[in-house]
Every structure is written in C-alpha cells, then in structure tokens.
Image: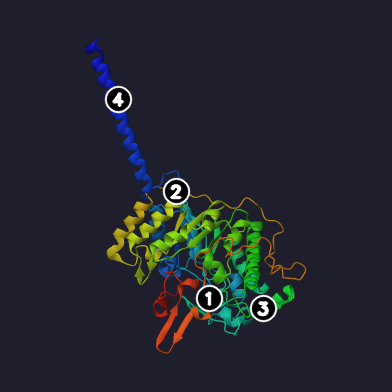
Amino acid sequence: MISFLFPQWLSLRVLKLLSLFFASYFSILLISVWNAPVLSQNTPEMRAVWLTTSDTDILLDRPKMKEAIANLASLHFNTIYPVVWNSGYALYPSKVAQDAKIQPFVHKGLQGQEPLKELIEEAHRYKMLVLPWFEFGFMAPPTSELALKHPNWLTQAQDGTQTTYSAAGEVVWLNPFHPEVQKFITALVMEVVNSYDIDGIQFDDHLCLPVKLGYDAYTTNLYKQETGLEPPKNYKDANWMRWRANKLTEFVAQLNQTIKAQNPNKILSISPNPYHTAYNSFLQDWLDWVRKDLIDELIIQVYRSDFAVFQREISHPEIKEAKGKIPVGIGILTGLPNRLTPIDFVREKALAVRQERLGIAFFFYGSMWNTNPELRNERKSTFQSLFPYQSRRIAKVNPIKPTNPVNPVNPVKPTNSNPINATKPTNPINPSNAVTPTNPVTPNPTNTVTVTPNNPIIIDSSIDPTNVTGEPILINELLQFTP
C-alpha cells in the first residue's frame, strides 16, 4: 500500500513545486514588463517627433527627407509634426501669404519639389500620421514682411512696447482678437487643410497672447465696449486675464468649427506649456478647450532639467482629466543643436511618461541622434529599445460635431449683442481654484527680460513660451537655434 501511494505522493509534490515555480516566474515577468520600456504590439501609443527648420536640409533635400522618414518608421514612430509656419513665412507654396504681400518667394525643395507634399506621401507610405505644425502662431520677427506691412495687426504692452524676447530672439505678436488677424491665420490653416492629404494640423504655445500684452487700441476699445470698463493697469488682474483668455478660446472654437465644417476627420492638435504657465503667462486656457471639445489632441511641453519637477508636472490632475477625453502626450526635449540632452535622461523621462499612460513627443528630430556622430549608435539604439514594437495610430477626433461653422472668409466680428462677461464668465476655469497650480507665475514684468550694461539678455524660462530647457539661458546661446 505504501509502495503504491509513494509514486502518487511524489507526483503531486512535483506538480505543486512546478505550480509554485511558474506562478513566481510569471509574477516576476509581469513586474519586469511593467517597468521595462516595452509595450504590447496591440497597445496604441502616441510616438511623435517635431521636424523643425533647424532641419533645413532634411526638410528640403529629398534623399535626406526620405532617410529621416525611413529612420523614424524603422524605430516605430507613428506621428510627425513638420513645421509649415515659421518666422512670419509659410514653408510651402502659399497663395494666402502671397496675397497678403508678406512672402516674396515660393518655398521649394533643393530638387525643385514641393517639400510638404512629398513628406506627407513618404510618411503615409509608412502609415504615419502627419500634422503640419504652425510653429510661430501669432508670433513674428519685427523685421518680417508680416510685421512691417501690417503694423495695425500687432498688439502691445501698456507702455507701448511691442516686442518680447524668446528663443527666436526679439519678436512681436499679432493681436489674436483682431478680425483681420483671425481671418489671415484661419486662411493659412484652411489652405493647408484643403491642399494636402494631412491628418490634422498643430499649433503650439505661440497660439497665445503673452499676459502683459493686449493694450493695443483695438483690444482696449473692445474691452470697454463689452464691459464698460477701462483695461486695468495690472495686466495680472483676474477679470482682465479671464476676458482675454475667453477671447482666445473664442478663436480656437472658430478655428475648430471652420476645420471640421470642411473636413470633420481632421485633428486639431495643441502643444502648450503646462497649465499653470499656459494660463498665467500666456492666457491659454487649454483645459477649457478640452472640456468644450475644441481640440482633439494635446501635447504638453514639459522641457524640465530637474527630473523631480518633470515627474510632478506630468502627474497634475488637469492632465489626467484631459487624458480621459482625448489623446494626451508629453513633449520631451532631446536637445538643441549646440547642446544635446543626455540619452539616459531622455530614456528616464520617457519611462516616467509611460508609467502615466501618456503619449510621447520628442523635440526635435535633428537632436535625437543626428548632431553627434560619435553618439549616434548609442542614442539610436535607445529609441529602438523604447519602441521595439509597432503602434499604429488611427486619427481620432471629438465625436461632437460643430454647429454654425464659421466662414473663414468672413469671420465673426465681436459685437455688443453677445458680450463675454469679464466678471462672470460661463463655465470659467480658475487657475487658482479649479486646477490648483503649484507654482503660479508672479506678476513681475521685470521677470521676463533682464538687461543691464554689464549683463547679456537673460530669458526666464518660467514665463517664456519658446524656452525649451526649463531654466534661464543666455539669449546669445539660444539665438544659435534661431531658424
């Protein structure tokens, strides 16, 4: 009897040990997969990259462009943002720009080709989404034809100054509330939407109004007309900020409606700063835009050199709220032409973003691995380890269809019949209340640019929309990055 039961007991013992072994093995495997930079082949993930005019040869030279797209496709990227509006000029053949008499040249490639058209065709061949990027938005160099030929389109600070300093150097700002400016920007967008087989368009942190601006004659008269009040001397006045932010939101709504009326399947993508900076410094209430279904994709530029700060930024509640409605990604800086971000730091940030179940966009292609031949293999292999599997994106837009589309030829002009109440806005987003920003910007106008006889111009990154580092930098260094 004992001899009969012994083999049966032994087999049960072995079976139990095997069960424990496999349970432990798969537990360890699951934990390692969770922490590893690998997602399932079936998991859709935004993997995007910006192509800037710092990549001039890549955008204009056909062989280099094809090589770049093939590289990105081989590393399983699925979204590209090629610049089409920069320094006050259209980087494609634009009748709108020519009719406005701001562009005395036709943008062509080195082989005589139309660069944007060929880039779109090449990217689509690899099933990548293409969203042309209006990089400068309402910003322009003061010496551009746009600024010189249309001075009435520009806004200003209370003291009459029109320029601010940024990574692009000294710039002026188009008044985002002026009907002619709105008509012009909308016409540029619709020209691209109607002329090219694109998946959408993107604006960034320059679709804004710096908070100290808005004291031009048009805006102050409109404010007095709608509120009966003079614009406050304090540009950080809560009601004055809210009124201007609402006006910017009105334009985003108009732009969204115009695009969707022409083609409801085109994505409207925005890549702003984190919310506390976007609202407090640039009047971009992007959380309101998300809540009102005015945008279809959000890429938040979090170019921070401190990893702890980066982690805090990407875990804010407004990001989690936005993620519940639309695709949300985090912009990660891979470097500037003259200063690369260490690839281990890029990887660490990418893994932190993935832990939050957010998409990733890298700024910019030229600094991913192309600027340093010695580090090329190491940097390129890191991106390969981050994205070992394909992740096919399908263009998705908000299901709510717009009503009463705006005609871009005749945009709605502000009237007194439907005023925006500056003191009691509809469904306001209060940055000191609803979202609880951790580090609101101090209303100190001297915090923007510091100029002394013994010191060069310094940019304070906390309030500068084009700063790509998150820390104060000498303007001389950043000007090397100017397109």
- Residue 47 seen in the current view: no
Residue type (three-letter) at the residue carrying disc 3 = Pro
Which circle's residue, 2 or 3, is located before the other in the chain? 3
Q: Is residue 17 left or right of residue 307?
A: left
Residue 370 drawn above or below residue 445: above
Q: Are marks 4 and 2 in contact (CB under 8 Å)?
A: no
| Residue farthest along the top direction in this orientation | 1
- Residue 231's tag is 3
Q: In the picture, which quadrant includes the N terminus?
A: top left
- Residue 393 seen in the current view: yes
Q: What percent of the width, then of the height, locates residue 472?
A: 42, 75
Name the secondary structure under disc 4. helix
For disc 4, the marked residue is 15
Residue type (three-letter) at the residue carrying disc 1 = Phe
Which circle's residue, 1 or 4, is located before the other in the chain? 4
For disc 1, the marked residue is 105
Name the secondary structure under disc 3. loop
Residue type (three-letter) at the residue carrying disc 4 = Leu
Neighbourhood count class around disc 4 (C-alpha, 10 Å): few under 14, some 14–19, many 20 upward: few
Which circle's residue, 3 or 1, is located before the other in the chain? 1
The alpha-carbon separation of the residues under discs 4 and 3 comes to 80 Å
Residue 72 drawn above or below residue 166: above
Residue 291: quarter of image: bottom right
Residue type (three-letter) at the residue carrying disc 2 = Ser
The alpha-carbon separation of the residues under discs 1 and 2 comes to 39 Å
Name the secondary structure under disc 1. loop
- Residue 391's tag is 2
